[in-house]
Image (cartoon, rainbow, N blue to C red):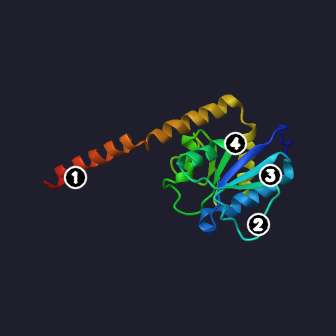
Amino acid sequence: SPPIFLPKKPWIIGVIGRREPTKGTRYALEAFEKIARIDPHAHLKVAFGNLPENWHHDRAEVVLPRNDMQLADYYRSVDVMLAPGTVQLGAVHYPVLESMACGTPIITTGYLPANSENAWIVPTHDGESIVQAAFEVQRIPIDQLSIKLDNANDAVREFFWPVVARKFLDEFGKSEHIYH
């Protein structure tokens, strides 16, 4: 395989720490360990902790956002966010939505509003695919990254409260005609 281009600057990978196996944190940690062996500049930033017992890495940091502003700052502080859950794929997932809203590239297993036009989609239970996607995010030309992030921004707009409220009101209007 071709050599991996490694910029000479730190890059930060983010994940929300969760102990539930279905959240996929295990796969994010496995991926980071592989990335860290390849790239001495890679760091991991875990929001909220909740890591497996005895898991530690010298280049991993736990942060504890205390409110929405600090959580947004967390998303903006990472170069790529991981959301490798294993269940409820196709459902809206807050870390995916929030990362996209903050302009942070996201690697996920298929949560909304992510798709191949605005995020990197990887298979479940597959740390190696996360590694490959992370290096792809790191190497993507800025113009192509801008397109993905613009697409993510557009996708997030569908979840703004005025848009969601209008959709609900439209649905309620349809039900009036059905039941009356």
Mark closer to the chain start, 4 or 2? 2
| Number of the front mark, 3 or 2 | 2
Disc 4: which residue: 79
Farthest-out residue, front: 66
User: Which amino acid type corresponds to the residue marked 1 in the rendered image?
Assistant: Ser
User: Which amino acid type corresponds to the residue marked 4 in the rendered image?
Assistant: Asp
Check whether the beta carbons of the residues at disc 4 and disc 2 lie within 8 A of each other.
Answer: no
Q: Residue 26 falls in which quadrant of the image?
A: bottom right
Lateral position of residue 40 relative to residue 155, left or right: right
Marking on residue 35: 3
Marking on residue 175: 1
Check whether the beta carbons of the residues at disc 1 and disc 3 lie within 8 A of each other.
Answer: no
User: Which amino acid type corresponds to the residue marked 3 in the rendered image?
Assistant: Ile
Lateral position of residue 34 relative to residue 140, left or right: right
Up/down of 21 relative to 140, above or below: below
Q: CA distance from mark 4 to mark 3?
A: 14 Å
Disc 2: which residue: 55
